[in-house]
Amino acid sequence: MGASNQSSPRKSFSSNFEDITPWEHAVDGEALLDELRSFIQRYVVCDEHTATAAALWITFTWFIDAVTVAPIANITAPLPNCGKSTLLDLMGLTVKRPLKVDNVSPAAIFRTIDMYKPTLLIDEVDAFLNGNEDARGILNSGHKCNGNVIRLVGNNHEPQSFSTWGAKALCGIGSIASTLDSRSIRLELRRKLPGETVENLRHVNSEEVDYLIRRLARFAMDNYEVVKIARPTPIPLLDNRSQDNWEPLLAIAEAAGAHWSSEARIAAIAITGAGNDEEMPDTNTELLRDIKEVFENDRIDKIFTADLLAALCSMEEAPWKIWNRGNPITARQLSKRLKDFGIRPADMRLGGSVRKGYALIKFSDAFKRYLPSTIDIAATPLQPTDNGSFG
């Protein structure tokens, strides 16, 4: 008999979520977190603070019903081949109710979260969220336990509320939208050096994984009420949103023991950059600062768009060279971001050529409002330079 052309029926999502039997005995929280952190570092190249935060975030997913803030795990790296997908896959082995996706529609996001309460693990998020404002808004709304969206359903188009609350990890190259970034724990990875070695996650011992997740389940069961009522002392150097993000992780660390409470606070300060002389900018602020630097370094008052893009992409440690899914930021992407500040490209003549570009004077208001140290460009006379422009 020939093979049937009919595809086999898809399994229900409910079959993806196995019932985990908690470990038979009480668990030493600090020993468990130590082991989980070591487990991460066996397979992923990262610094100690990132491994600490990742271990706490994985554990947090088992306490999702005991907390009121769900920080996003932002797994990121400046370039490919840094272990991002490996860490996401490792999370898929150890978090509560994992559901890994490479692409998902906005409607599928909130319906899946509302129905199955998974830990959502989204890979290639830099491509998935590109221009997808609806999906971004849904992910943002699930940061707090009362997060929801309302959609019209059924033939009668009746409004229905769908919960967006839950644990989510995003994996991609470079920066994510500032609204998502502010709701995230940043887990930045780095490329392996020739002398550094890690194990292949494909060869992980399933019994070891089972031992880990059963003890995570037991630790969460025994410490549910402790974490639920915990009110960790705020870290003075963190802003309010970062305090929110780290609160459930600090509560879990305190439940584990004094050593991990201290480790978690050190990691929070290191990862957020708290205490630095210069506040870490969001993407739009960073773009303004870099554009200001281009104008100042070249002492010009006008620049063609192509030349501005080239200057931005030549900057050390700036994200613009890989902004477009690993490729340089485009003129359209630049224009879209600057449009939010009321800045648009215009035709201009430079060196006998007429092309689209940007004039320094158009940035005056944005520089004054969003870069507080900037002087008033309009009130400061520009001095002519040797090439006839002004700087």
Image (tube, helix red, strand yellow):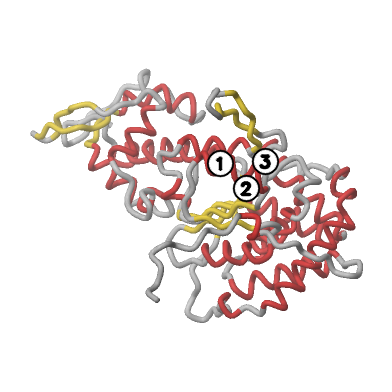
Instruction: Mark 2 or mark 1: name the one nearer the start of the chain.
Output: 2
Instruction: Mark 1 or mark 3: name the one nearer the start of the chain.
Output: 3
According to the image, label 1 marks what residue? Answer: 180
Whether residue 243 is visible here, answered yes or no, is no
Expressed as whole percent of the image width and height from the top left, the position of residue 143 reads 65, 39
- In the depicted structure, whether residue 356 falls above or below residue 250: above
CA gap, disc 3 to disc 2?
A: 11 Å
- Front residue (pair 302, 233): 233
Q: Nearer the viewer, mark 3 or mark 2?
A: 3
Expressed as whole percent of the image width and height from the top left, the position of residue 126 reads 44, 50
Q: In this view, does 329 lie to the left or right of 162?
A: left
Q: Specify the label residue 165 is tagged with.
A: 3
Label 1 sits on a secondary structure element that is helix
Contact between labelled residues 1 and 2, with CB atoms less than 8 Å apart: yes
- Front residue (pair 194, 248): 248
- In the depicted structure, whether residue 235 falls above or below residue 133: below
Whether residue 74 is visible here, answered yes or no, is yes
CA gap, disc 1 to disc 3?
A: 14 Å
According to the image, label 2 marks what residue? Answer: 72
Which residue type does callout 1 highlight? Leu
Mark 3: give few (<14), some (14-19) or many (20+) Cα within 10 Å: many
Expressed as whole percent of the image width and height from the top left, the position of residue 273 reads 62, 49
